Image (cartoon, grey):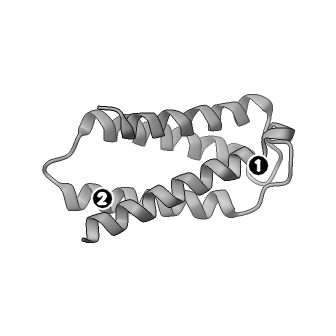
Amino acid sequence: MLFSILLLIHFLAFVTYLIHLALLWPTKGAAPRGKAGLILGVILLLTGALLVWISYPHINYYKVVPKTLAFLVVTLINIRFGERDLSKAAYFGLFGLTISAGCIAIFH
């Protein structure tokens, strides 16, 4: 039951982050950004870590490792730009990594 609740929270945070990026689409990231990305990132990190902890030792490393690396790159991009507007390359990088992480999660 706890696993299902955490997975639902993780999924909702992911979808909300994807919507957050999609709302920036017309400006390709050149719009003002708030703390929503940071909050959603922390939620994704915590729920992801808890899901791995609950599942241990039966973990799909072929999914966890690439998603963790993608999350690390997203974090580095967000740290690099901070409160400033994203460049087009950074925006498309964030969007691509987010979609890739979702694809890794749903495909076997």
- Residue at mark 2: 51
Q: Amino acid at mark 1?
A: Leu
Quick one: which residue is furthest to the left in this view? 57
Quarter of the image with the C terminus is top left
Q: With respect to residue 60, does 2 lie above or below?
A: below
Residue drawn at (49%, 63%), measured in percent from left and top?
43
Q: Nearer the viewer, residue 14 or 42?
A: 14
User: Tag 1's secondary structure?
Assistant: helix
75 with respect to 83 (left or right): left
Q: With respect to residue 92, does 47 lie above or below?
A: below
The Cα–Cα distance between marks 2 and 1, rounded to whole angstroms, is 28 Å
Residue drawn at (25%, 38%), measured in percent from left and top?
61
| Mark count | 2
Residue 56 bears which disc, if any?
none
Quarter of the image with the N terminus is bottom left
User: Callout 1: few (<14), some (14-19), or many (20+) C-alpha neighbours within 10 Å?
Assistant: few
| Comes first in the chain, label 2 or label 1 | 1
The part of the image, by quadrant, that contains residue 60 is top left
User: Tag 2's secondary structure?
Assistant: helix
Q: Amino acid at mark 2?
A: Leu
Residue 23 bears which disc, if any?
1
Question: Residue 37: image x %, image y %?
Answer: 65, 56
27 with respect to 90 (left or right): right
Quick one: which residue is furthest to the top in this view? 89
Q: Nearer the viewer, residue 89 or 99?
A: 99
Q: With respect to residue 66, does 15 lie above or below?
A: below
The part of the image, by quadrant, that contains residue 94 is top right
